[in-house]
Image (spheres, grey):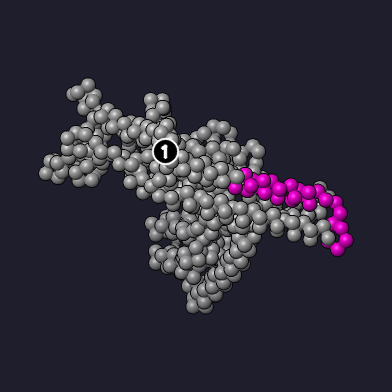
């Protein structure tokens, strides 16, 4: 190839740059760009565009490289230039499949630092050996990461480490001003500046707010993610779903494809480790309410996830058991009613269902709530033996739960004080005596904490599986709140609370309704 070519003879090329998520080479984008530029000048190629995938792994093709391949297929360029072949990818399946797409379209994949002539048999063999070695290196690194992640999980630490919103992260290594490195136990402690904000996110969601509105509040309040960027609805959702502020660690299921690398695994379990190194920011009850609402919103229709009206998603047709829609009749002074969706869309042959005014439905619901509250008040006034026994049992369970939660909090504070005292100690004593005593006491405290948390979890399970009686008793204070604040409470909040008391409202043929309790 001549040392100098006219511009019209230069081969149109797209320069592709990738920096791995694991940053195993620590090769900067600038170095890759410079190397590719010099190669293009030397070999008669013209870079028509640069495409960068920063912080992206080569173990899959969920990257912008797919768009580059499509541009080669569209004839926008003839060559994809990379710093090394490993930048294109590191898999034994994805690399050959996508390389075949490039070559089928008449294009080429060329490396600026691994120059082989893939038009010859020996060149293709050399390139194949390079790519196979890249895949081997990726598998080896993946196995090491998997071992590291498993060790961290066994120690009660999140697999990937890193800072977490709502917590102060105490790294395992601390660097002193004189350059020395001090090792300490890695842990997370509640951040006095953001812990309350993190807990309020859960409270906001279980009261009917959307992830988007929570993200807007965080950004307005000057809060940023641990990466220093603005919050979005998806980042708030991922943060809350992680369960970390509730004291959980996220474990990928071994049966899930790609679980070893976690690159293509969406199946995971949330587990509380006995030696957990971070205290929860919310109570178990708040976490339970959050998971219940998330379970509902995952399968609910989009318009019912963040209800615009108090009865959204609760009204059904009593005849066909199908959904009912909210309708405004402008001919009758904007009368608002609910009617069977099937009848409205397909006529009376589809369903003989009817429509009922919203005022009638709300009156029936309020009557049901009042009856529920009055029953409890009547039992209390009569002083029946059954009510008194149930009340004493409920009070005893509530007291026991409060005592266990307080014991967990005290043990967490004791562990924190114990860690700080050891960290501030200047002398380790003869033959590491202080360290042995520290580890022994720390183990005892954590075992005691794990035992108390186990008792608390068993008590909560008993309360939640207590059947109709417990669910009915839990609904009473909700009913009282709804009756007292119906006219002032926002619609999303009413909708969320109603779902804790009633399962649905059926429209009946005589233009009345039937209210079904949540515990039925």
Percent x, y of residue 492: 40, 34
The residue under the point 54% across, 35% down is 219
The residue under the point 56% across, 46% down is 400
**Extreme residue in the top direction:** 333
Where is 105 relative to 53, above or below?
A: below
* Res. 323 image quadrant: top left
How would you rate the neighbour count of disc 1 (Cα within 10 Å): few for under 14, some for 14-19, many for 20 or more? few
> Of residues 465 and 269, which is closer to you in this image?
465
* Res. 149 image quadrant: bottom right
> Of residues 63 and 497, which is closer to you in this image?
497
Q: What span is colored magenta in the figure?
A: 404-432
> Of residues 331 and 279, which is closer to you in this image?
279
Percent x, y of residue 120: 49, 76
Q: Is residue 388 left or right of residue 308?
A: right
User: Can residue 412 be found in the magenta stretch?
Assistant: yes
Percent x, y of residue 17: 55, 56
């Amino acid at each position: 190839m001549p040392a100098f070519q006219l511009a019209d003879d230069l081969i149109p090329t797209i320069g592709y740059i990738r920096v791995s998520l694991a940053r195993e080479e620590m090769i900067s984008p600038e170095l890759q760009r410079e190397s590719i530029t010099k190669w293009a000048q030397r070999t008669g190629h013209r870079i028509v565009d640069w495409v960068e995938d920063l912080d992206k792994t080569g173990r899959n093709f969920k990257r912008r490289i797919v768009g580059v391949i499509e541009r080669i297929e569209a004839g926008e360029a003839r060559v994809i230039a990379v710093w090394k072949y490993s930048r294109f990818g590191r898999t034994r399946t994805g690399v050959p499949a996508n390389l075949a797409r490039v070559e089928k379209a008449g294009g080429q994949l060329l490396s600026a630092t691994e120059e082989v002539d893939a038009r010859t048999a020996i060149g293709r063999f050399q390139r194949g050996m390079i790519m196979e070695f890249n895949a081997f290196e990726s598998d080896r690194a993946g196995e090491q990461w998997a071992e590291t992640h498993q060790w961290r999980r066994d120690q009660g630490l999140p697999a990937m480490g890193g800072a977490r919103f709502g917590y102060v992260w105490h790294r395992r290594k601390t660097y002193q001003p004189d350059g020395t490195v001090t090792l300490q136990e890695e842990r997370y402690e509640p951040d006095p500046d953001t812990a309350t904000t993190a807990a309020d996110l859960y409270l906001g969601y279980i009261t009917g707010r959307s992830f988007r509105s929570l993200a807007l509040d965080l950004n307005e309040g000057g809060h940023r993610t641990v990466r220093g960027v603005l919050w979005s609805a998806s980042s708030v959702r991922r943060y809350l779903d992680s369960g970390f502020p509730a004291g959980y660690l996220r474990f990928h299921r071994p049966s899930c494809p790609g679980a070893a690398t976690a690159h293509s695994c969406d199946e995971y379990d949330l587990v509380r480790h006995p030696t957990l190194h971070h205290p929860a920011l919310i109570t178990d009850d708040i976490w339970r309410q959050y998971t219940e609402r998330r379970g509902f919103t995952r399968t609910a229709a989009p318009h019912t996830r963040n209800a615009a009206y108090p009865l959204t998603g609760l009204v059904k047709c009593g005849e066909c058991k199908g959904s009912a829609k909210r309708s405004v009749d402008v001919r009758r002074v904007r009368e608002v009613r609910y009617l069977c969706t099937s009848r409205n869309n397909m006529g009376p042959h589809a369903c003989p269902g009817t429509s009922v005014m919203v005022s009638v439905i709300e009156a029936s619901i309020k009557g049901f709530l009042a009856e529920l509250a009055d029953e409890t008040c009547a039992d209390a006034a009569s002083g029946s033996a059954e009510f008194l026994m149930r009340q004493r049992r409920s009070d005893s369970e509530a007291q026991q739960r409060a005592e266990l939660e307080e014991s967990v909090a005290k043990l967490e504070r004791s562990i924190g004080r114990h860690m700080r005292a050891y960290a501030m100690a200047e002398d380790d004593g003869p033959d590491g005596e202080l360290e042995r005593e520290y580890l022994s006491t720390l183990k005892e405290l954590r075992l005691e904490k794990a035992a108390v948390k186990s008792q608390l979890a068993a008590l909560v399970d008993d309360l939640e599986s207590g059947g109709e009686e417990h669910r009915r008793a839990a609904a009473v204070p909700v009913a009282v709140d709804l009756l007292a604040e119906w006219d002032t409470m926002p619609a999303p909040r009413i909708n969320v609370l109603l779902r804790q008391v009633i399962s649905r409202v059926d429209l009946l043929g005589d233009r009345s309704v039937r209210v079904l309790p949540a515990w039925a």
